[in-house]
Amino acid sequence: MLAVGKKHESWVDEGISRYEKRLKKPFNLTWQLLNHSSRENDAARTEESARILAKIDDRDFVVLLDERGKNVDSPALANKLRAPIDASRNVVIIIGGAYGVDPTVHSRADFTWSLSKLVFPHQLVRLILTEQLYRAQDILAGGKYHHV
C-alpha cells in the first residue's frame, strides 16, 4: 500500500492489525506512507505523484483508489486481483493525497477503483481497504461471501 498522509491513528492501526493478522500468503500487506507535499493544488499533486511513481516497479499491478474509479463489489475485486496474484506480481494499491494524483499516475494504473461514490477520510479508507483485501483473499480461497 502506498498512501500519501500521516501515520495511522491508533484506532485505525488497531483495525488494520486485526485484518492483517487474518491475511495468509500470498497476501502480504505492507504500508508505505509518503509525506504530504508542503505545496498546494497542482504543485502538490505533481510532487506527490512523482514520489508515488518512484516507488512502483514496472512489473507491479497498480490499483489506484479514486472516487471516479470503477465501483465494484467484493467478488469482482477478488477476481480483478486473481490474475496478478496468480502471476506472482506485486499488487500496489495507491491512496493519493488531498489533491489526488496527476494523469501520470492514472495512466500507470492497471485498475482504478472506487470504494464508493462517497468520499471518506483517508484514515478510514485505509481500514476499509485492509478489510476488503482480507475479504478478497477469503473469496479467492473459496470462503463464503456474505451478501448484505
Image: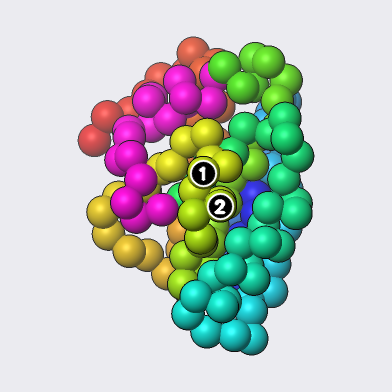
Q: Is residue 98 left or right of residue 20?
A: left
Q: Residue at x 47, y 80 (%)?
A: 41
Residue 48 in which image quadrant: bottom right
Part of the protein shown in magenta:
66-82
SS state under label 2: helix
Pick whichever, 90 or 56, lies toward us: 56
Asked whether residue 43 appears in the rendered view, the answer is yes
Above or below — where is 28 with respect to 99? above
Asked whether residue 123 appears in the rendered view, the answer is no
* Tags 1 and 2 touching, CB below 8 Å: yes
The residue that disc 1 covers is: 107
Q: Residue at x 26, y 54 (%)?
A: 117
Residue 119 in which image quadrant: bottom left
SS state under label 1: helix
Which amino acid, by three-letter code, is at mark 2?
Thr
Q: Which mark is residue 104?
A: 2
Q: Residue at x 32, y 51 (%)?
A: 68
Which amino acid, by three-letter code, is at mark 1?
Ser
